[in-house]
């Protein structure tokens, strides 16, 4: 520490109130952004969690294990002589998982409480009609959402899948797939095949109509009409998948990279949205601050413009990191095996952890470069950590109390930060005011020990006096009650009255009546009886 002071010209690090105020302002802005990102991080982080489920096949949030995830599909056996055929047969499973996961991820981002599930994972393994269905918030299947996912048309001789749509259409027209058309099942096809497959269907429908116009043989017409019904069913019930043919193959061969790519896109989207919020909020605050400084004559117009630009860019960049990092942490925590971590993922803790990491690194940098001393470093780290944790907690509460995206979380975080900062400030001031030197503290400790010993002696004396008093009084009561009992046994009322009056006199009371005659006179008189 002394070396660091000497490098700064022998001067101690400055701890001006200006820097402290700036730190508080920055901290308040950080907390505001943490709260602002609450809803966004929950939605985008939930999407990250869905991709982790698809990879591992284990949904810890809902305590539900899938039949297979992408990693398990990738471990499927492949015969060396039929590698292409085996892999592309297994691609269908990867396509199912990838499609379901991407739909669920998008639903989480959009705030949709429904989710898509494979029928295999619902206990309906090898369902004759459907590969996937949608569930509502109560886990009930939504009617009309059953879908068959078909990734067909791959050919080893067509590595670029130029004719895959034609081959896929021909397979869908075969008798093997007739049951899907008869039951009007929705058929999901690769994104890259969709347009080409519809074009094939239109071409086939037109050709069949032309043939029907020329053919008169009933049996031939029946065959053509069956083909026409199938082609029209394909045209009507085909849906575009959220997965391409190449993506399905890549997910089968490289499940971890495929998942990382999808997660990366979500994280980047969350970061960009956070950066937008950060630029707007940070820029607006910078405009206000610089306007005040300009009016006070503390800066020129050019300096104000530069400072606004710098603040806006800084807040945008920092917000990107907090939004992106918080999203990733939220997804990981949501699918953790620990119930505590899953519970914490529902709060503002994920983005607060990233924000604390950023602010802590800034404080540590100032300490390492000699701008602040160790005491100030520890104080600022404690302050920022406590304030961010409070902001994250209140952000979650605010979002529940005010269920308006961004607004509830932002107001909650601002309240949490303000309360925590105020309490921390009061505690810090109290410690400063009550701080004493080591020798003075030792004197106080000695005095306290003596005081405790004196109080112990007083207590022993008091207890002894009380015991003596009550033992004496106990004997008085005992003798009086014995006399009263004996008086009752011989029917001597005067004896009973005398014993009772002894107790009254002993405690300094006034005897109301001394014999039976005075008692009877008191009973018939109009004067109130006072005990």
Image (cartoon, rainbow, N blue to C red):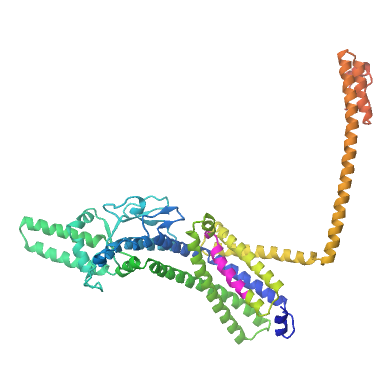
Q: Looking at the picture, does residue 6 appear above or below residue 466?
A: below
Residue 110 visible in the displayed image = no
The stretch drawn in magenta includes residue 478: no
Tell me which residue sits at (86%, 58%) in the image.
446
- Direction from residue 72 to residue 516 in the image, left or right: right
The stretch drawn in magenta includes residue 346: yes
In depth, the one of 328 and 201 nearer the eye is: 328
Tell me the quadrant of the picture where the N terminus can be found: bottom right
In depth, the one of 139 and 360 nearer the eye is: 360
Q: Residue furthest left?
A: 217
Rendering coords of residue 356 (x, y %): 59, 69
- Please give the count of numbered marks on the rendered protein: 0
- Direction from residue 120 to residue 429 in the image, left or right: right
Q: Residue furthest top?
A: 490
In depth, the one of 336 and 403 nearer the eye is: 336
Rendering coords of residue 458 (x, y %): 89, 46
Tell me the quadrant of the picture where the C terminus can be found: top right
In depth, the one of 402 and 82 nearer the eye is: 82
Tell me which residue sits at (33%, 53%) in the image.
120
- Direction from residue 336 to residue 72 in the image, left or right: left
Quadrant position of residue 283: bottom right
Highlighted range, magenta: 345-362
Rendering coords of residue 309 (x, y %): 56, 81
Quadrant position of residue 72: bottom left
Q: Looking at the picture, does residue 282 appear above or below residue 302?
A: above
Rendering coords of residue 374 (x, y %): 70, 73
Q: Main secondary structure of the magenta part?
A: helix
Residue 484 visible in the displayed image = yes
Q: Looking at the picture, does residue 42 appear above or below residue 368?
A: above
């Amino acid at each position: 520490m002394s070396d660091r002071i000497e490098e700064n010209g022998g001067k101690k690090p400055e701890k001006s109130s200006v820097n402290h105020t700036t730190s508080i302002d920055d901290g308040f802005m950080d907390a505001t952004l943490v709260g602002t990102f609450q809803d966004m991080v929950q939605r985008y982080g939930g999407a990250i969690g869905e991709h982790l489920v698809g990879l591992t096949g284990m949904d810890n949030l809902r305590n539900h294990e899938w039949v297979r995830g992408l990693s398990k599909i990738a471990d499927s056996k492949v015969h060396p002589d039929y590698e292409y055929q085996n892999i592309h047969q297994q691609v269908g499973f990867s396509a199912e998982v990838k499609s379901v996961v991407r739909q669920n991820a998008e639903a989480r981002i959009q705030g949709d409480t429904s989710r898509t599930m494979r029928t295999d994972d619902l206990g309906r393994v090898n369902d004759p009609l459907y590969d996937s269905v949608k569930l509502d918030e109560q886990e009930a299947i939504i009617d009309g959402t059953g879908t068959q996912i078909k990734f067909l048309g791959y050919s080893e001789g067509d590595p670029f899948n130029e004719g895959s749509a034609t081959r896929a259409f021909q397979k869908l027209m075969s008798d093997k797939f007739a049951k899907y058309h008869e039951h009007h099942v929705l058929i999901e096809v690769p994104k890259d095949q969709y347009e080409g497959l519809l074009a094939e269907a239109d071409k086939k429908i037109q050709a069949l109509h032309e043939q029907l116009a020329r053919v008169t043989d009933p049996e031939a017409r029946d065959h053509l009409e069956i083909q026409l019904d199938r082609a029209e069913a394909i045209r009507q019930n085909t849906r575009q998948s959220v997965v391409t043919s190449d993506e399905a193959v890549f997910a089968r061969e490289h499940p971890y990279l495929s998942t990382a790519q999808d997660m990366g896109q979500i994280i980047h989207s969350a970061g960009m949205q956070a950066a937008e919020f950060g630029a707007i909020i940070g820029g607006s605050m910078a405009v206000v601050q610089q306007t005040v400084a300009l009016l006070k004559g503390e800066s020129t117009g050019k300096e104000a413009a530069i400072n606004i630009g710098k603040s806006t860019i800084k807040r945008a960049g920092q917000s990107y990191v907090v939004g992106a990092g918080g999203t990733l942490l939220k997804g990981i925590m949501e699918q953790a095996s620990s119930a505590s971590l899953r519970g914490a993922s529902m709060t503002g803790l994920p983005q607060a952890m990233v924000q604390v990491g950023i602010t802590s690194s800034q404080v540590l940098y100032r300490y390492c470069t000699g701008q602040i001393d160790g005491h100030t470093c520890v104080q600022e780290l404690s302050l920022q950590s406590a304030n961010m944790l409070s902001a994250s907690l209140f952000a979650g509460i605010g979002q529940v109390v005010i269920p308006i995206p961004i607004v509830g979380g932002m107001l909650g975080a601002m309240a949490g930060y303000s309360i925590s900062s105020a309490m921390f400030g009061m505690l810090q001031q109290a410690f400063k005011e009550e701080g004493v030197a080591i020798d003075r503290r030792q004197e106080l400790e000695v005095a306290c020990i003596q005081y405790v010993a004196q109080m112990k002696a007083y207590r022993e004396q008091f207890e002894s006096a009380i015991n003596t008093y009550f033992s004496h009084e106990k004997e008085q009561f005992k003798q009086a009650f014995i006399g009263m009992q004996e008086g009752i046994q011989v029917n001597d009322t005067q004896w009973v009255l005398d014993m009772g009056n002894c107790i009254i006199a002993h405690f300094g009371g006034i005897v109301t009546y001394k014999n039976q005659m005075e008692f009877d006179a008191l009973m018939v008189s109009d004067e109130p009886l006072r005990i």
